[in-house]
Every structure is written in structure tokens, then in C-alpha cells.
Image: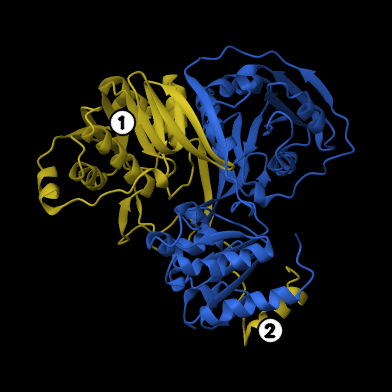
């Protein structure tokens, strides 16, 4: 039997992480079917149909699915799941919201946030904020799985022509209402998906000094992160917090400035591809995970760093 | 109104966990344990709603071994009225926890269930949503703002793109994010008083639920270690390495 993947989209375009989830789904079983549920989302269904790894698209159009309220979406997914062995979605705020409702309705113990498919019933997932990896085998007949998108490459977008089947909407309980969505309006990329993250810690000594961090972030088109110590000290708001109790980030380049490297911070960034640490304390634990360590006073090093970056003309936008 | 707030005892977030050599799990002996951090936010919000007069009673529940009572006492010390300890000595998956909570909800009949968005040990992020589904209640996950009304609650929730506002009918399950509030510390007199607050004990086995885990943990291992990096002498060398060696600039 096949895999049912639930697409994330905004009713006009597919969200990029769905492509990563498609790759993961195809490692479970080659017969990947994608459910596109939304309101006036025909374009999304067509977009998904052109992904070569997708074998079939199930398109369900109803105003009830416009804002992906989990109370409305879960009954549709639960019903559609009847014919499938696996139900999968991204382990982001979209998938995390509705998938456990589906699992509970089907009396399935969900496997959350997998980073590797070992076999159709065995997966690897991080626990303790990535400080340990657990290999788990699901003994449920049907499986509900969420996928950590950054652990899988995005699927090729074009070249396929999967069949699109329109399916009927199901009854909704009318117990929840969407009011509004305010997307963070920042010139900078989102912390969770940025290619480069520049983070500051208590070493910055004040909120004003965080400008040294933001200047470099702007130059590199990077997101701004912070350690819990910097957030607790009030230097920056806690939506910037990287770590076990904040966000887990996996950028190509992570620059930790004035961050000692407490366990709780390392848990949120140590899977980054390249890590740079700038700290005046040569013994700081952050150096043990850094590819490039610079033992220096950040108040001298950061202006120099910005000046050097200004000399480069190759920075990717 | 009445709130049931669920708290979990986990390894403290500041502890460097150690994986057992035989791959069966992580060491928990002689390790500092605390309340799961976002569960503290759930308790704080429940107590604030009680202080505002909108909520009359806050019942704290924890499921686990006897020491889970310490976690309940902590909730009582910051303002919860009553504790329920569901004794269970083995690990129970979120599906089983949600089934236990459902039983307790049917008995206690709260208007809302508050809990943390996720536990920092198994990182599942399932229990609240599963409980809501089992009860046919609406849910609010990743909650960073609560505005309780008579028959519904307005919620601001943190999503990847920013913030979302929803209105859910009561009764509802609310899973709390760290930005919701600033959990208070218990004062010594309140810790003493909490010892006298009622604590009901129930044995999970007596609830008539099949709690067999469906997920078999095959092994737990340390993540691959990063290879030791190098120290650079100055900023110019750093930039040159990033550009020419790591090729990330």
C-alpha cells in the first residue's frame, strides 16, 4: 500500500518544506500520494502533480479547509487515511498541529519528527533536543509519521504529471474559528529556515550592543539568534532564542558570538553545517563544536569582521 | 470555571544527558529533575486566570512514578488548589497519556486543560492534540496569549510564519509556549502550605485502559560527534577560511 502525505500550502502556492517531506515519504514507499486540502487551491494541486516523486494527487476544495484548522482538517485526513499504510506530514507547526489528532482518531501511536527512514516501520528520531538519537519501530498496523524537513533534501519540483483526483470534503465540527494570521515582517530571513544565523550571547553585555550582531546579519542576509542567557538578560526578545527551549536551527553557517555554549544552547544549533565561535574565553565549551574558533574580544572582532565582509563581493543574497 | 493543568517531571533542561552504554536509554539516576519548562507556563497561566477571578479551581495532574508528586507539589506551591497523581512506573507514550487524561477529564469535568506544548525529554509534541481529538474538543497549540471569554477563548499562537489568532469554543485543550508568561517562583511559606493541599492518588492500572506501548525503542545512541575544528588567529583568516575552505560566504 501507499503513503499519504499532507501538503502544506497557502492555497495559492506549495510551501517548500512539503518537497522535503515528499523525499522522506518516497523513502518509506515509492507510491507517494499527496492530499491537497484547501480553499480554491487548484493551482497547488497542479503544482504538486508536477513533482516527479508524486504518483497521485488528492485534491479537496472547501472553505472549511482554508486556514487548516486542525479540528476541520483532521477528520478529512483520518477518512482519507483508510486506504493507506502511512500518513505523513512535515514536523513543523503545520504538521505538529493536526497529525496527533489524526493519530488519536485512528488509535495510532505517532512517530514524531523523524530524521531518517531505516525501513517502512523503523525510523530514527532525535530526543532530548537532539542530544540523543532513538531508533524506533512502530508496531501499529498503520503509521502516522512527522518528518523533520531539514533532514531531507527537497524533491525535484518539475517534470512529473501525476493524476489529480478530486475528493469530497467531510463534515466539520464547527468548534474553532480562524481570526487572523500576522506573518512576521522582517527584512531578515526566518530563524528556522535561514541559510546563515548570527547569534549573540551574554558576552554582548547589553541590548544596544546587539547592533554589532544585526549589522553582520544584515550584511550576510542572515537571521539573528540569541542564547537563553541573552534573552533572560533582556538583550533581545525570546523569539530569537536558539536552544533546547527555543528554536532548533540547522543553517549552512552558524556564527556564535559571546556565547559560552551551555548544553541548552548547543542542543539548538550543533547540527549546523559550519559553526563559527567568537569568544574571548578560549576554554568556552562552544569551541568544542566550532569548525572555526576565534579567541578574541568581540567588541574588536565584530567591527573587523564587518569590514572584511564589506570587502567581499561574493556574498549570496 | 475549572482548569486541569498537566505537568511532567523531566530531566532538568540544564543537565547534559548521558546515553547508556547498552543503548537502552539515558541515565536518570542521580540526575536533577524538574518540571518540563512549558508546563511551568501552563501552571502560571492557570493560576493567573484564577487570580483574575475567571477561574475558580485549578487542579494539577502528573502521571508517573511516585516522585511525580514533587512536580505536583511545585504546581500547588504556586497556586494550584488540588493535585492528582496517576501512578505509573513505566514509560507511557503520548497516546496512553492522552487516554489517561481523558479519563480524568471525564471525572473532573474541567472547562479547559492546560499543558506544555512539548516535553523536553521525548520531544513528541502530541499529548494535547491527542487529548483534544479523543474528547472531540478544539485545541490551541503553541499558545502565547490567552483571552478567556464566557463560552470561548481567544488564543494567539506561535506558528512558523509568525502569529495566528484563533477562537476556540469551550471546553478546550490549550498547549502553552514559553512566551505565554513568566512563571513565578514559589515562596517558602507557599511551599509549606502546598504540603497541606489535597493530593489524590490513582493507579494507572486501575483505569481500565490498555496502555501497551506501540512503539518499540530499539536503541538510543549519541548523535555523531562533530570533528574538532581549528582556531584561527584573526578575523582576516576567519573570513578567508569561510570563503575559500568552507565556501559558505
Q: Mark 1 points at which residue?
A: B205
Task: Tell me the residue at 26%/26% (across/down).
Answer: B2
Task: Tell me the residue at 70%/49% (across/down).
Answer: A152
Characterize the local packing of mark 1: few (<14), some (14-19) or many (20 or more) Cα atoms within 10 angstroms.
few
Q: Name the residue under label 2.
A: B237
The colour scheme used to paint the residues is: by chain
Residue B212 visible within the image: no
The percent position of residue B185, horizontal first and vertical second, equals 23, 52
Q: How many marks?
A: 2
Give the colour in which the image draws chain A. Answer: blue
The percent position of residue A312, horizontal first and vertical second, equals 76, 74
Check the residue under mark 1 and report the chain it is in.
Answer: B
Image quarter of the C terminus of chain A: bottom right
Residue B136 visible within the image: yes
- Residue B1, image quadrant: top left
For this orientation, the residue located farthest to the front is A208
Image quarter of the N terminus of chain A: top right
Q: Which of marks 1 and 2 is in front?
A: 2
When the figure is inspected, residue A77 is found, relative to residue B235, above or below; the finding is above
When the figure is inspected, residue A139 is found, relative to residue A268, above or below; the finding is above
Left or right: B52, with B103 as reference point? left
Say whether disc 1 or disc 2 marks the residue closer to the N-terminus: 1
Label 2 SS: helix
When the figure is inspected, residue A23 is found, relative to residue A98, above or below; the finding is below
Check the residue under mark 2 and report the chain it is in.
Answer: B
The percent position of residue A15, horizontal first and vertical second, equals 70, 39
Q: Nearer the viewer, residue A138 or A168?
A: A168
Characterize the local packing of mark 2: few (<14), some (14-19) or many (20 or more) Cα atoms within 10 angstroms.
some
Give the colour in which the image draws chain B. Answer: yellow
Task: Tell me the residue at 42%/43% (across/down).
Answer: B177
Label 1 SS: helix
Amino acid at each position: 500500500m501507499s503513503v499519504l502525505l499532507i501538503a502544506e500550502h497557502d492555497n495559492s502556492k506549495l510551501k517548500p518544506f512539503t518537497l522535503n517531506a515528499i523525499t522522506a515519504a518516497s523513502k518509506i514507499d515509492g507510491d507517494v500520494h499527496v492530499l491537497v486540502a484547501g480553499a480554491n487551491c487548484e493551482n497547488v494541486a497542479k503544482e504538486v502533480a508536477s513533482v516527479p516523486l508524486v504518483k497521485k494527487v488528492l485534491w479537496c476544495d472547501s472553505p472549511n479547509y482554508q486556514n487548516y484548522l486542525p479540528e476541520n482538517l483532521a477528520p478529512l485526513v483520518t477518512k482519507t487515511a483508510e486506504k493507506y499504510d502511512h500518513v505523513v506530514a512535515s514536523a513543523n507547526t503545520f504538521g505538529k498541529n493536526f497529525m496527533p489528532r489524526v493519530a488519536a482518531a485512528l488509535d495510532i501511536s505517532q512517530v514524531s519528527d523523524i530524521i531518517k527512514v531505516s525501513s517502512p516501520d523503523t525510523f530514527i528520531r532525535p530526543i532530548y533536543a537532539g542530544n540523543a538519537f532513538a531508533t524506533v519501530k512502530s508496531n501499529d498496523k498503520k503509521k502516522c509519521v512527522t518528518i523533520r524537513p531539514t533532514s531531507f533534501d527537497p524533491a525535484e519540483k518539475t517534470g512529473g504529471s501525476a493524476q489529480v483526483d478530486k475528493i469530497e470534503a467531510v463534515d466539520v465540527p464547527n468548534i474553532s474559528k480562524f481570526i487572523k494570521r500576522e506573518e512576521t515582517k522582517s527584512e531578515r530571513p526566518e530563524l528556522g529556515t535561514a541559510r546563515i544565523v548570527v547569534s549573540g550571547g551574554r558576552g554582548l553585555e547589553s541590548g544596544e550592543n546587539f547592533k554589532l550582531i544585526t549589522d553582520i546579519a544584515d550584511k550576510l542576509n542572515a537571521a539573528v539568534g540569541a542564547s537563553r542567557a541573552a534573552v533572560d538578560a533582556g538583550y533581545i526578545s525570546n523569539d530569537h532564542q536558539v536552544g533546547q527551549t527555543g528554536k532548533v536551527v540547522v543553517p549552512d553557517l552558524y556564527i556564535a558570538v559571546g556565547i559560552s555554549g551551555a548544553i541548552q544552547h548547543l542542543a539548538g544549533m550543533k547540527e549546523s553545517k559550519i559553526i563559527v565561535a567568537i569568544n574571548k574565553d578560549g576554554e568556552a565549551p562552544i569551541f568544542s563544536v566550532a569548525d572555526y574558533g576565534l579567541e578574541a574580544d568581540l567588541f574588536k572582532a565584530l567591527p573587523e569582521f564587518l569590514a572584511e565582509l564589506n570587502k567581499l563581493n561574493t556574498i549570496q543574497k | 470555571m475549572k482548569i486541569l493543568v498537566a505537568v511532567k517531571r523531566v530531566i532538568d533542561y540544564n543537565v547534559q544527558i548521558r546515553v547508556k552504554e547498552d543503548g537502552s536509554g539515558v541515565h536518570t539516576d542521580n540526575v536533577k529533575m524538574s518540571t518540563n519548562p512549558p508546563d511551568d507556563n501552563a501552571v502560571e497561566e492557570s493560576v493567573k486566570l484564577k487570580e483574575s477571578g475567571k477561574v475558580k479551581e485549578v487542579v494539577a495532574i502528573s502521571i508517573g512514578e511516585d516522585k511525580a508528586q514533587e512536580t505536583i507539589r511545585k504546581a500547588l506551591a504556586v497556586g494550584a488548589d488540588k493535585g492528582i497523581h496517576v501512578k505509573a512506573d513505566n514509560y507511557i507514550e503520548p497516546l496512553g497519556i492522552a487516554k489517561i487524561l481523558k479519563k480524568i477529564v471525564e471525572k473532573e469535568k474541567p472547562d479547559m486543560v492546560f499543558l506544555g506544548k512539548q516535553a523536553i525529554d521525548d520531544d513528541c509534541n502530541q499529548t494535547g492534540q491527542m487529548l483534544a481529538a479523543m474528547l472531540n474538543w478544539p485545541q490551541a497549540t503553541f499558545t502565547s496569549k490567552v483571552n478567556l471569554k464566557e463560552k470561548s477563548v481567544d488564543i494567539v499562537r506561535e506558528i512558523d510564519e509568525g502569529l495566528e489568532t484563533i477562537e476556540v469554543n469551550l471546553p478546550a485543550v490549550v498547549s502553552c509556549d514559553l512566551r505565554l508568561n513568566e512563571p513565578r517562583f514559589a515562596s517558602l511559606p507557599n511551599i509549606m502550605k502546598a504540603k497541606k493541599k489535597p493530593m489524590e492518588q490513582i493507579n494507572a492500572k486501575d483505569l481500565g485502559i490498555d496502555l501497551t506501548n506501540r512503539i518499540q525503542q530499539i536503541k538510543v545512541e549519541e548523535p555523531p560527534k562533530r570533528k574538532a575544528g581549528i582556531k584561527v588567529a584573526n578575523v582576516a583568516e576567519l573570513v578567508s577560511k569561510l570563503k575559500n575552505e568552507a565556501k559558505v560566504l
